[in-house]
Every structure is written in structure tokens, then in C-alpha cells.
Amino acid sequence: MGARRTRLSMGTATLWLSVIVLLPLVALATEAFSGGFGGFWDAVTAPGARTTLWVTAKVSLVVALINMVTGTLVAWVLVRDDFPAKRIVDAVIDLPFALPTIVASLVLLSLYGPDSPMNVTLNATQPALVIALAFVTLPFVVRSVQPVLIELDHDVEEAAASLGASNATIFRRIILPALWPAVLSGTGLAFARAIGEYGSVVLIGGNVPGATQVASQYIQEQIESDVPSAAAAVSVTLLAITFIVLLVLRLVGDRSTRKEQDA
């Protein structure tokens, strides 16, 4: 009975995964290579595609690194410090998950657009892209690091402090190694979300080719120009970049975990 239930569960999971993930990916790859590898290569190395992929990857990497630091800091404050309205701040972290991202772009445009109440005009610039993408990706790092911080054994930190270790040494030698896999995981998820984001940058970014046009906007442009194979080719390239980054971060995180366990 148990074996039958296991097979049924595996079959259901495989079917669902195939319908939701595998079949769309196969269809996307088929469209991307509809003109052969030469057609795919021409599509992703076209000047517009090459530039937009570079801008997207560069901005996404900057955003991921920023959130690696700020997300870890926010998670630390939420777990280790007590302050008024802590529960409210903790709930606000999840707002980007629930808020339509185009609303975020509209709000940012009102803050940093031509009529900025703060007299700071950033729209149609790469810093505007960084701000918009940082807003929607911050929760990934915070929510990845927060549970690990909660589970950390404080006795080890107290023992190190009693032996004269400074706070910086305790963080570097005891806390950070335990947090590092979660930090890498959250950073990878932030990068993956940023590289495919559309709504939060559609207004504040300005969609300037060669400057602020991100890959998702280029893909939409190709679809509207009735070149679906080029749109699919760029989409497959984004998927490949994201997969490689997530795989590398996962391997580094697993290696760090094994090293900590062996120690």
C-alpha cells in the first residue's frame, strides 16, 4: 500500500511538473531553434539583443549584490533586535510579493520622475532600474536568511564572547559561515527575479534601447514586431544565464555547508 501511494505521488508530481514547467520550456526551446542553431545565434547576437542582455545582466548582478548585504542586515535586525512596530516592518517586507509590480513602477516614477517631490529625477536611467529591481527582490534574501538566524545556537556566540572574541570576529568566524548558504540562495533568487522582471521597470526605466531597455521589454518588442523566434531565443538565453547562476551558487552553498559540518 505504501509503495503504491509513493508511485501515485511520484506520478502526480511528475505529471504536474511536466504540464507546468517542462512542456512550456520545450515549446519555448522549439520556437527559439525553429531556424536552427544559426538562427538562434543570430537572434541573440543581434546588436539590440546583445546590448539589452548586457544591461539586464549587469543591473541584475548589481541589485543582487546590494540585496545580499541589505537583505542580510534587515533579516539580522528583524531577528536580533526589538523595536516598536517590529511586526509591521516584518509584514511590510512581503509587500513586493503581493503588490502588482507595475504599481511599484508607478510609485517610483512619482517619486523620482520629472515631477519628483524630492527634486530627484532618475527615470530613464540605470540607477532607476536598480532601485526598482531592489524593491521587488529584497524579500528573497530576507526570507532566506531569517529562518537560519532564528535557528542559530546563541550558546556558541556567548562562549566565543566569554573567551574574548570581538563582535566582528564572532560574526565572521561563527555566524557568517552558518548564514552563507542561505545568503547565497537568497541572492540567487533575487538575481533570477531581477533578470526577468518587467512590471517594476516598465515606467521608471523608460525603455531606452542600449541604456535602460531590459530583456523582458526587448522580448515584448520582438513579439509585437512579429518575430517570435527572436523573442524565444532571448528568453532561452535568460533561462540559461539564470540556471547557471543558480547552479553555481547552489554548488558553492553546498560546499560551504559540507565544510562547516566537517569542521
Image (cartoon, helix red, strand yellow):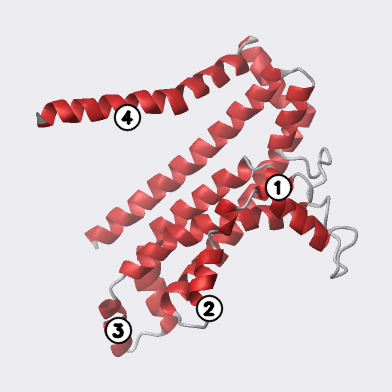
Quadrant into which the N terminus falls: top left
Question: Does 109 sit above or below residue 22?
Answer: below
Mark 4 → mark 1, Cα distance in angstroms: 33 Å
Residue at position x 77%, y 28% in the image = 221
Instruction: Tell me which numbered mark, 4 or 1, is placed earlier along the sequence.
Output: 4
Element at badge 1? helix
Q: Residue furthest left?
A: 1
Mark 2 → mark 3, Cα distance in angstroms: 28 Å
Amino acid marked by disc 4? Ala
Q: Is residue 129 among the parts visible in the rendering?
A: no
46 sits left or right of 185 in the view? right
Residue at position x 81%, y 44% in the image = 211
Instruction: Tell me which numbered mark, 4 or 2, is placed earlier along the sequence.
Output: 4
Residue at position x 86%, y 64% in the image = 116
| Res 165 quadrant in image | bottom left
Residue behind mark 1: 102
Disc marking residue 158: 3
Quadrant into which the C terminus falls: bottom left
Residue behind mark 2: 85
